[in-house]
Amino acid sequence: MTDSPSKPTDPQPGSEPEPLPDPDPEPRVDQIDIAGDIAHRDRVYDYVRGGSDNFAVDRNTAEFAAAPSAGGLDHARAAVRANEAFHVRAVTYLVQDAGVRQFLEIGARIPSEDNTHEIAQRVAPECRTVYANNDPVVLAHSHTLRRSTPEGSADYVDADPTDPETILQKAQATLDLREPVGILLSAILYHVRDDDDPWGIVSRFVTAVPSGSHLVVSHLTSDIIAEQITEAARRVNQQPGFTLTLRTHAQISRFFDGLGLVPPGLVPVDRWHARGTARPEPELWPIPFYGAVGRKP
């Protein structure tokens, strides 16, 4: 592993460089810390999940934050793995059992091997997905998030995850908001402070979509391995530009106000299992993520 993240826009030998999808990319991409002096939350997450798009400073930050747990980085990786598996099961359920064919993923991260549009289109190739984030690191990789089946579509909008109005306006180029939408907020809301009203932000997204739409949320919690996760959050929040807000079961439940929770409700992500989805494997360590799927009546 090197200390330079892979750049999808770098030319390969004997080929022309692939242009970034943003119509005016240079000012945004220039915000990427190519020197690797400052940790970045999406690169830290990428490292924990086993990716290679990260610097030494990101790896050091992840290991420093994970140190309070007896399992260290292995425990952190188990938590991220469980969260991502929950995301796969939730999207699969929405396509396979709930009949959802449109998805809006808020706070999209660096692409992985199992992105939302790929999960959905394996079941129904006509599915449409819009990813939304204003992160220059994710933007630099966003061409991967635009690769779709011919029957469906996938797009990326460069917009702040806390700005529902802009995201919803831009998403309508791909999604029909008169039809049910799966709104996905996986491991993103804990980056929003209480003072910025994350519940109001989520409510605005839910209000904009019709009956039969679904909300998927996963969120770090202070209810599980409280001492270790609280210390980990304190260490993360020491880093420049990081915000990590742990919330309780009651606080996370508020995101689903007015919605009907799909059984088994709001539970640790490694225990969430809906009809039609693969049963999760037991984890070695407690997983400090809650997750749920709610349906708009």
Image (tube, rainbow, N blue to C red):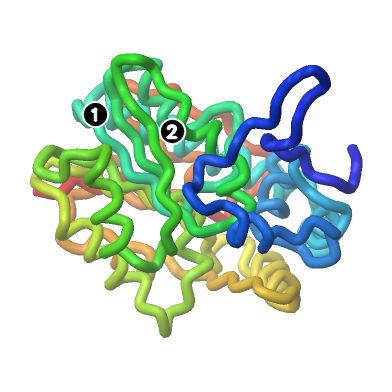
Task: Please name whichever residue, 19 or 127, is drawn nearer the observer in this view of the structure.
Answer: 19
Counting residues from the start of the chain, the first of labels 1 and 2 encountered is 1
Identify which amino acid the numbered label 2 is placed on. Answer: Thr
The residue positioned 31% from the left and 38% from the top of the image is 103
Task: Tell me: 9 left or right of 97.
Answer: right
Task: Tell me: 105 left or right of 145.
Answer: left
Dividing the picture into quadrants, the one containing residue 104 is top left
Position of residue 266 relative to residue 18, above or below, is: below
Return the x and y of residue 277 as percentages of the image width and height: 38, 24
* Mark 1 closeness class: few <14, some 14–19, many ≥20 residues within 10 Å: many
Residue placed furthest toward the right: 2
Q: Secondary structure at mark 2?
A: helix
Q: Is residue 50 visible?
A: no
Return the x and y of residue 241 as percentages of the image width and height: 66, 74
Query: Is the C-beta separation of discs 1 and 2 under 8 Å?
Result: no
Dividing the picture into quadrants, the one containing residue 175 is top left
Identify which amino acid the numbered label 1 is placed on. Answer: Arg
Q: Is residue 255 visible?
A: yes
The residue positioned 17% from the left and 50% from the top of the image is 260
Return the x and y of residue 190 as percentages of the image width and height: 50, 66
Mark 2 = which residue?
116
Q: CA distance from mark 1 to mark 2?
A: 12 Å
Position of residue 19 relative to residue 219, above or below, is: above
Q: Secondary structure at mark 1?
A: loop
Return the x and y of residue 270 as percentages of the image width and height: 51, 40
Mark 1 = which residue?
101
* Mark 2 closeness class: few <14, some 14–19, many ≥20 residues within 10 Å: many
Residue placed furthest toward the bottom: 195
